[in-house]
Amino acid sequence: MTGLEASRRVVVTGLGPVTSIGIGVADFAAGLRAGRSGAKPITAFDTAGFAHANGCEIDDFRAADWITGTPLDDLGRAARFSVAAARMAVADAGLGPADLRARRALVSMGTTDGESRDLDGLVESELERGPGAFDPVIARRVGAVRLSTSIVAEFGLTDVEATTLPTACAAGNFAVGSGFDAIRCGDAEIALVGGADAVCRKTFTGFYRLGTITPEVCRPFDKDRKGILTGEGAGVLVLESLDAALARGARIYAEVLGYGLSCDARHPVAPDRDGITRGIEMAHRDAGIGPGDVDFISAHGTGTKANDVTESGAIRQVFGDRPPPTISIKAMIGHTMGGASAIAAAACALALREGFIPPTINHVETDPECGVDCVPNEAREADLRVVQNNALAFGGNNAVLILGRAPEPSPVAGAA
């Protein structure tokens, strides 16, 4: 533990997952426990010309079920995920818009692509209508900042700071870390933090040309893994101080113990073992824990040859030859880019509260070069106290988050 006073300890009191294996806490938790797969053929764009084009799209998402304060035409798909996930998280925390407006708030969302799906649409519009003849409705919603400002508008917040963090596939953890800092230093009383992205042609094509799109399913840490599946969705967490949560009798999923950021900038796309190691060590120091305290690791675990070997090497560099169970939910939901580590953080919080480790599905045989217990194919019941959530991004941007079991309420003075 860090020794912080209760007013500066930070807890997770609400979760808003929008994923291809479940929307909302109950369905997402059930999907994690069951090892559900979101993989299926992509329908977001014309995939003619690609030898394979599976992904993890969300096909049962109805934005109008969640978004009531913002015209849907003003929101791209990623912003719709973002606002809906925030609505879910706030409701899950037992709060309403008025409760948010009564407190100094932070809204921080991470993303890789922003509204690149709409940018695809603008390009198609110009090709059809001629240069400059793009759809103005689409044009006004493409700014990535709308992933956070649309949440502000939805709840009618005024005493608020809104940021969108573009640190690629580590952006969700960056956002959680920013909320953690804001609350523990007193700059905010409540934070809505997370990440969101939507499946788009640009990102799929980029990874396809890199040779990292798997033909069928994602198989992290497996000997015969072939790469990622692009996915989509959002994860939003409600953070507040421990004393505020206890004072209102809130359900607490987990405590944010600390986080670490590192940027090695060694290569545009290749991960660096030493850079990852530094991020993990910084997170442990910030959280006041040692490697032996971690009960499982939610790895970045993309399923590419390079990532899984490099990340596993960094984990062994910190934890030794027998690291804790190391799993990847990307086998289920695909790589949701800027939403990935935020959704994984929500999964970690659920795992801590409900006492289980999600599985790494599609697993056949562990790659000896990885050498981790990836909890293959079936969830595992476990008494968890501390979990680690890794996020790695292009350019060597790494963000590692440490969550702990929800604090036990202090005994009432004089109680028997």
Image (cartoon, rainbow, N blue to C red):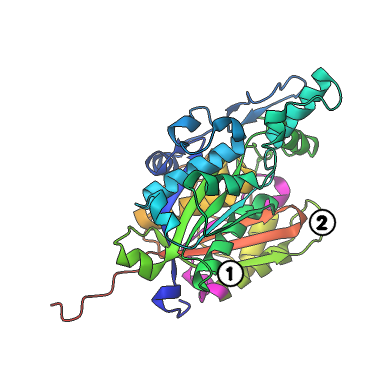
Residue at the (48%, 78%) spot, across then down: 2
Rendering coords of residue 170 (x, y %): 65, 54
- Badge 2 is on which residue? 267
Q: Quadrant of residue 198?
A: top right
Residues in magenta, as a range: 286-307
Give 30 or 90, whichever is nearer the viewer.
90
Give the residue furthest to the right.
131
Rendering coords of residue 232 (x, y %): 59, 38
Residue at the (69%, 54%) spot, across then down: 167
Q: Is residue 153 above or below residue 108?
A: above
Give the residue furthest to the left.
416
SS assignment at label 1: helix
Rendering coords of residue 246 (x, y %): 32, 66
287 drawn magenta: yes
Which amino acid, by three-letter code, is at mark 2? His
* Label 1 close to label 2 by CB (< 8 Å): no
Q: Quadrant of residue 401?
A: bottom right
- Number of residues whose C-alpha sits closer than 10 Å to that of mark 2, classed few (under 14), some (14–19) or many (20 or more): few
Checking the image for residue 283, the label placed there is 1
Q: Is residue 220 visible?
A: no
Q: Earlier in the sequence, mark 1 or mark 2?
A: 2
Give 89 or 387, whichever is nearer the viewer.
89
Give 188 or 264, whichever is nearer the viewer.
188
SS assignment at label 2: loop
